[in-house]
C-alpha cells in the first residue's frame, strides 16, 4: 500500500507529542521516505525545543495587592450600573409613551417618532458593525 | 498534560465553578487565585505594559463571572477566559492603540537557566544565551498572529485543543499556523545569526 505524504499539521503534532504512539511510529516511517521533510522536521523541532525554554517572568508581588478585592468590587459595581440603567430605560420608555399619548400637537408626536426612528437606525448600525466584525481577524486594526 | 490548573485540580476547579455559578464569590475568588498569574502574563504578552495587563486581566475575570451561566463547567476554564481576555485586549488596542511598550526581553526569561546552574561549560552557556537572544528577537518580529500562537504554545504552555478553543479556530488551523510561525521563526533566527 502506498504511503501518504507528510503534512505540516502532522509534522507539528509529531513534534509536540500530540500523536498516539502508533501514529508517531507511522509518521517516523513516512519521514524516512521523505528526506526533505526529515530536514524540515529537524529544523522545526530545534526551534520548538528552544522556544520551550522560554517562560514568562513572574510578575512583581505588588501586582497582587488588592487584585481580588478590586475584581469583587467591580462585580458589585457592575450589578449596580445594570440595575440603574434598566431603571433609567424603563423611565425613559414610560416618559415617551406618556408624552406621546398626552401630546395633542402632531408636531410633538412626529418629533417623538423621528427620535425613536433615529435611535433605532443608530442602534442597528452599531449592531451591524459589530456583527460584521466578528468573523474577521481581530488583529486587523491593531497597530504593530 | 497534568490534571492541575494553578493550585486547583480539575475536580476542584469544577466544584468552585459550579458554586461560583450559583453566585458564590468566595468560590470564584479561588478560581481567580488559581489563574491570575497565568492570565496576567498572557495579558502582558498582548498589551505589553503592566497597568493594562492588570486592568485587562481583572476585567476578564469580571466579564467571566457575569457570563458564568453560559459556561459549561465540564470544560476547562482557562481557554474560555483567555478568549474573553483576548477580545478585551484587541478592542482596547483598536480603540487606544498600544501604550508604553515593554520588549519581549523584559517579559520572558530563559526558564532552562534555572535548571542549568551547574553548567560548567561557559562557552556552551554563552552560545545558549546568544541563541535565546536570537529567538526572543525573532519572536518579537513575527506577524502578530504568529507571535500570539508561539506565546500560547511555548510560553503559556497551552495544548492544541486549548489554543483552538481560546482562538475559536479548528485544530487543523492551530497546527498549520504553528507550522508557518515556526518556519518564520527559523528564518528570522537564521537572519540574526552573525
Image (cartoon, coloured by chain):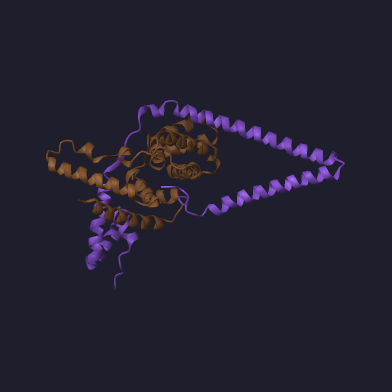
Chain colours: A purple, B brown
Confirm whether residue B33 shows in the render: yes
At a point 24% along the width and 45% down the height, the residue shown is B132
At a point 48% along the width and 38% down the height, the residue shown is B60
Query: Quick check: A79 left or right of B98?
Result: right
Q: How many marks?
A: 0
Relative image position of residue B69 (x, y in whole percent): 55, 41
Indicate whether B185 appears above or below B96: below
Indicate whether B102 appears above or below A70: below
At a point 46% along the width and 29% down the height, the residue shown is A68
Indicate whether A102 appears above or below A67: below
Q: What is the residue that sits farthest to the right in this orientation?
A: A104
In-front residue for pair A127/B18: A127
Relative image position of residue A19 (x, y in whole percent): 32, 56
Relative image position of residue A35 (x, y in whole percent): 22, 66
- Which part of the image, by quadrant, shows the N terminus of chain B? top left
Query: Quick check: B185 left or right of B68?
Result: left
At a point 22% along the width and 61% down the height, the residue shown is A39
Q: Please identify the quarter of the rendering in which residue B42 is found.
A: top left
Relative image position of residue B142 (x, y in whole percent): 34, 51
In-front residue for pair A27/B180: B180
Confirm whether residue A20 shows in the render: no
Amino acid at each position: 500500500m502506498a504511503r501518504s505524504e507528510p503534512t505540516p499539521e502532522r509534522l507539528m503534532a509529531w513534534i509536540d507529542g500530540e500523536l498516539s504512539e502508533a501514529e508517531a511510529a507511522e509518521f517516523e516511517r513516512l519521514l524516512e521516505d521523505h528526506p526533505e521533510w526529515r530536514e524540515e522536521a529537524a529544523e522545526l523541532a530545534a526551534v520548538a525545543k528552544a522556544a520551550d525554554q522560554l517562560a514568562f517572568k513572574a510578575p512583581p508581588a505588588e501586582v497582587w495587592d488588592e487584585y481580588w478585592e478590586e475584581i469583587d468590587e467591580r462585580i458589585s459595581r457592575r450589578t449596580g450600573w445594570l440595575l440603574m440603567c434598566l431603571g433609567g430605560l424603563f423611565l425613559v420608555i414610560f416618559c415617551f409613551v406618556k408624552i406621546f399619548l398626552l401630546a395633542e400637537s402632531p408636531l410633538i408626536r412626529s418629533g417623538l417618532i423621528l427620535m425613536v426612528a433615529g435611535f433605532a437606525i443608530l442602534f442597528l448600525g452599531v449592531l451591524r458593525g459589530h456583527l460584521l466584525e466578528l468573523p474577521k481577524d481581530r488583529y486587523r486594526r491593531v497597530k504593530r | 498534560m497534568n490534571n492541575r490548573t494553578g493550585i486547583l485540580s480539575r475536580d476542584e476547579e469544577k466544584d468552585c465553578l459550579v458554586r461560583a455559578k450559583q453566585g458564590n464569590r468566595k468560590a470564584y475568588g479561588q478560581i481567580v487565585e488559581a489563574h491570575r498569574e497565568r492570565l496576567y502574563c498572557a495579558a502582558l504578552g498582548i498589551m505589553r505594559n503592566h497597568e493594562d495587563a492588570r486592568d485587562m486581566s481583572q476585567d476578564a475575570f469580571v466579564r467571566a463571572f457575569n457570563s458564568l451561566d453560559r459556561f459549561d463547567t465540564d470544560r476547562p476554564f482557562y481557554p474560555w477566559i483567555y478568549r474573553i481576555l483576548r477580545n478585551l485586549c484587541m478592542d482596547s488596542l483598536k480603540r487606544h492603540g498600544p501604550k508604553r511598550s515593554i520588549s519581549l526581553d523584559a517579559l520572558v526569561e530563559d526558564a532552562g537557566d534555572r535548571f542549568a546552574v551547574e553548567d560548567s561549560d561557559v562557552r556552551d552557556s554563552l552560545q545558549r544565551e546568544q541563541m535565546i537572544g536570537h529567538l526572543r528577537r525573532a519572536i518579537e518580529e513575527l506577524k502578530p498572529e504568529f507571535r500570539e500562537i508561539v506565546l500560547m504554545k511555548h510560553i503559556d504552555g497551552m495544548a492544541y485543543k486549548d489554543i483552538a478553543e481560546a482562538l475559536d479556530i479548528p485544530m487543523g488551523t492551530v497546527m498549520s499556523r504553528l507550522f508557518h510561525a515556526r518556519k518564520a521563526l527559523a528564518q528570522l533566527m537564521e537572519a540574526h545569526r552573525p
